[in-house]
Image: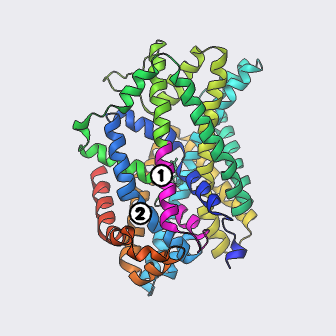
Amino acid sequence: MATSRGGFSSRLGFIMAAAGSAVGLGNIWGFPTQTASNGGAAFVLVYLVLAFCLAYPAFMAELLIGRYGQANAVTSLQKMSKNLWQKRFAFFVGFGGIICAALILSFYGIIAGWMMSYAVEPLAKIVGLNDVASWVISQGLVRNLFFTAFFMSFTIFIIRRGVEQGIEKWSKRLMPLLIGLLILLIIYVMTLDGAIEGLKAYLNPDLSRVFQPDLIVSALGQAFFSLSLGTSVMVIYGSYISKKENLVQLGAQVTLIDVSIAFLAGLLIIPAMYVAQSQGVAIFADDGSLIAGPSMVFTVLPTLFTSMGFIGLFVGFAFFVLMSVAALTSSISMLEGPVSYAVERHDMAREKATTLIGIIIFILSVIIIINLDFMLDFVATLATQYGQPIIAMLCCIFVGWIWNRSDVLAEIKQGNDTVEHSFFWKIWPWYTKFVCPVAIGFVFIHSL
Ligand code: PHE
C-alpha cells in the first residue's frame, strides 16, 4: 500500500516538506506582528517555551497518528479505534481537521494572492507599466479574484503531481530559496540607519509581561498555527514518512527550523520598521504601540521600499517573493489534507480530486472576497481560534487516552529502538495525556 499511495523519498524530503508547511505567513508576518504588539522579546521567550513544551508534544502526537495509520487523517485515527463509538469520534476529529485545513486555505489563498500582487508591482514599475503597478496593489474585487486564482493554481499544480514529485520536490526547491532570501534581506536591512534601534527593541524583553495571560494565549495560538496543528496536515505528512525514520528526532528538527525561521523573520521585520521610522514613516499607532497587522506589511514596509529608490524595487520584490514562497509551501500542505481523504476514501484519481477540491476551496475564497470586510476575519477566527485548538486537543486525547500505550511505544520504537529509555518517553506520554489537553483547553477557554 505504501508504494501505491506514495511517500517522502528521503529524510530531507520530509524535513523540507514539514518545515515548508510550518513556515508560512504565520512565521514571517504573524510572529513579528505578535512580537511587536506583545512586548518584544518577552513574547519571543514565552513563544520558545510554549513551542517546545506544548506545541512539539502535540505535533509528535499528530505525526505518530499518521505514521501508524499510513493513511489520511480519518482512516489513520479509525485504525486505532477499538469500537464503534471510537470510530465515530475518529471520524469527527479527522474530518474536522480536514475541514479546518480547507477553511484556512480559503482565506490564506487570498492573503497569499496579495503577497504575489505586491511582488508583481515592482516588476511592473521596472518595465515602466505604472498603471499596472498601481492596479495590482489597490484593493479591488477583480484584482483579488485574479491573484487568489493565480495562487490557487500554483497550489493545485503542485498537489496534482503527488507526494514525491509535487510536495517533496517543490519543498526542496522553495525552502532553500526562502531561507536564502530571508538571510540576504536581513543582512541588507542591518546596514541601514535605524536597524540597530529596531534590533534593540526586538531583543530587549519587557519581563513584566511574561506572565500576562493575553500574551500566553497569543503565543500558544501562534505556536499551534505555526506548526500547522489541528488541521490533519501533520497527520498526513506523518503517514508519508518511512518506518525506518526516528520520528522523535525528525519532529524536533522541524520544530527547531520553524521556530528559528520565525525568530529570523523578527530580525528582518522589526528592524525594517525602525529603518522606515528613520526615513520619516510613522510606525507607531495612536496608542503608542508598534503598527502591526496588514498596515505593517502593506503600508509601512512598501513605503520603506519606495523611499529606497531604485534598489527598493528589488528589495520589495525579494520581500514579497519571500512571503509568497512561504505561503505556497504551506498552502500545498493544506490542500493535501482533503485531497488524500478523497483519494483514499472515495477512490478518486489524485489529479481529479486535487482540481475538484481546489476549485471548491477557491469558490469559498470568492465568497470571502465578495464579503471581505466581514468574512475574512470570521473564517480566520473560526478555523484558527476554534477549529485548530479543538482538533489538536482531541488528537492528544486520542493518543493519550484511546491508543494503547504499548502500541504507541511500538510505533515510536520503529526507527528509534532505544526510545523506551529516553527522556522523551519518560515525559511525552504523560504530557500528551494530561498536560497538552488541559493547557490547550485552558488557553482556548481564555481566548473566548
Ligand atoms: N503553519 C502555517 C504558517 O505558519 C500555516 C498553516 C496552518 C499551514 C495550518 C498548514 C495548516 O503560516
Q: Confirm whether residue 430 shows in the render.
A: yes
Q: Please tell me whether mark 1 sits on a helix, a strand or a loop.
A: helix
Asked if disc 1 and disc 2 are in contact, CB closer than 8 Å, the reply is no
Residue type at mark 1 is: Leu
Main secondary structure type of the part rendered in magenta: helix
**Foreground residue, 181 or 403?**
181
Query: Residue 332 appears at what percent x and percent y?
Result: 63, 54
Is 245 magenta? The answer is yes
Q: Is residue 237 left or right of residue 446?
A: right
Counting residues from the start of the chain, the first of labels 1 and 2 encountered is 2
Q: Which residues are magenta?
A: 233-261
Distance (Cα) linking label 1 and label 2:
15 Å
Residue found at x 63% / y 47%:
175
Residue found at x 43% / y 22%:
196
Mark 1 nearby-residue class (10 Å; few <14, some 14–19, many ≥20): some
Tag nearer the camera, 1 or 2: 1
